[in-house]
Image: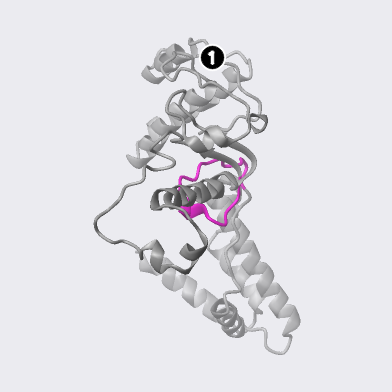
Amino acid sequence: PVLKPILDSIRHFKSIIQKRSAGEMIWDITQHLDILKPRAERYSLDDHFILLNVGNLLKRAQDFTRRNKQNHSLNAFNIYLEAVMRSGGLPSITPASYRTQEGVIVNTVHGVKGGEFPIVFLPFQRSASFPLNFRSDRRIKRPPDDWLKYSQNTDLTPREHHIQEERRLFYVAVTRAQEKLYLLVPEKATSRFIKELPNTLMEDHPMTDPHSDIKTYSDLKVKYEQHLQKALSREAYEQVKHYSDALAVIHDHEQGHPVSLGDTQWEAELKKDLSTKFKPAIPERINL
């Protein structure tokens, strides 16, 4: 029973392949397999991806047919496609994002050399963390300074040489920022490199208490997005629907629209969460 529709499709296409151009054959295949209409009606992200790439294939087949009127068969089109794919010229088309995805890249200073980012956070700006304390090692890890040519032109001690290397690394870190640089600094045991920076270049912003009970809508959205991801991983689609509805309710509540919730478990939990006094959103806030 499973093979019969496949065999019927093969016989159908074999009967018309000699009479159709590549463009007509690709269109007949999409119509016969009913690829386009159901996906156009449902139009999920995956459907959007499929429609874009099937449409691209149809366009290529039609263009090929117009350019090659003497030999525009499906077999000739397949040979053409194989040549294009071998040359790397047939990448898939990805739908444009409806929502800008904001994220954080966590890396070492060495790892971001040469890179630039709109906003950079530089943590651990405390003494003994940046710069690291100098430690003399009995084992030799590098040639002695006396063996290096540049040692003839410097009077730096090994400790001073270490600080200079750390300072160069600090320079690399702070110059990765294109627009804003945040230096996370403790009130005590502050890094010597921070103390060397002129006050005219910096603006102090004391951090808020991380243990305070004030919440934001962003925090609440993250909570329910995590519930949604876990439900998807378990294929618990009824919960997926509930958490999707919860996110829609949170959005309406944030916009000041009236919301109505029932007595189910997820609605009762959300009702409790929404009773919290929320901190107003910060303009151009980045949700980490």
Q: Please, what is the dominant secondary structure of the magenta stretch?
A: loop
Q: Position of residue 48 (x, y in %)?
A: 59, 51
Q: Quadrant of residue 131?
A: top left
Please state the horizontal and vertical placement of residue 285, each as a whole percent of the image. Answer: 60, 29
Q: Is residue 240 above or below residue 276?
A: below
- Farthest residue in the bottom direction? 70
Q: Nearer the viewer, residue 288 or 138?
A: 138
Left or right: 272 with respect to 58? left
What is the quadrant of the N terminus in the image? bottom left
> The magenta stretch spans which residues?
97-117
Instruction: Please tell me whether residue 47 is drawn above or below residue 238 in the rendered image.
Output: below
Q: Nearer the viewer, residue 169 or 13?
A: 169
Please, is residue 277 above or below residue 131 in the view?
Answer: above
Which residue is situated farthest in the left direction here?
A: 138
Place of residue 232 in the rendered image (x, y in percent of width and height, measured from the top left): 38, 39
| Count of marks overlaid on the render | 1
The residue lying toward the viewer, choosing from 249 and 43, is: 249
| Residue located at (63% from left, 27% from top) | 203
Label 1, secondary structure: give it.
loop
State yes or no: residue 207 in magenta.
no
Q: Position of residue 176 (x, y in %)?
A: 58, 48
Q: Read off the residue under disc 1.
A: 278
Magenta segment: does it hold 115?
yes
* Res 34 seen here: yes
Badge 1 amino acid: Phe
Question: Is residue 262 something one can see in this rendering?
Answer: no
Label 1 crowding class (10 Å Cα cut-off): few <14, some 14-19, many 20+? some
Q: Is residue 122 left or right of residue 181?
A: left
**Residue found 43% across the figure and 69% down from its top:** 6
Residue at 42%, 28% (x, y): give it: 189
- In the picture, residue 28 is in which quadrant? bottom right
Depth check: give the residue in front, 220 or 263.
220
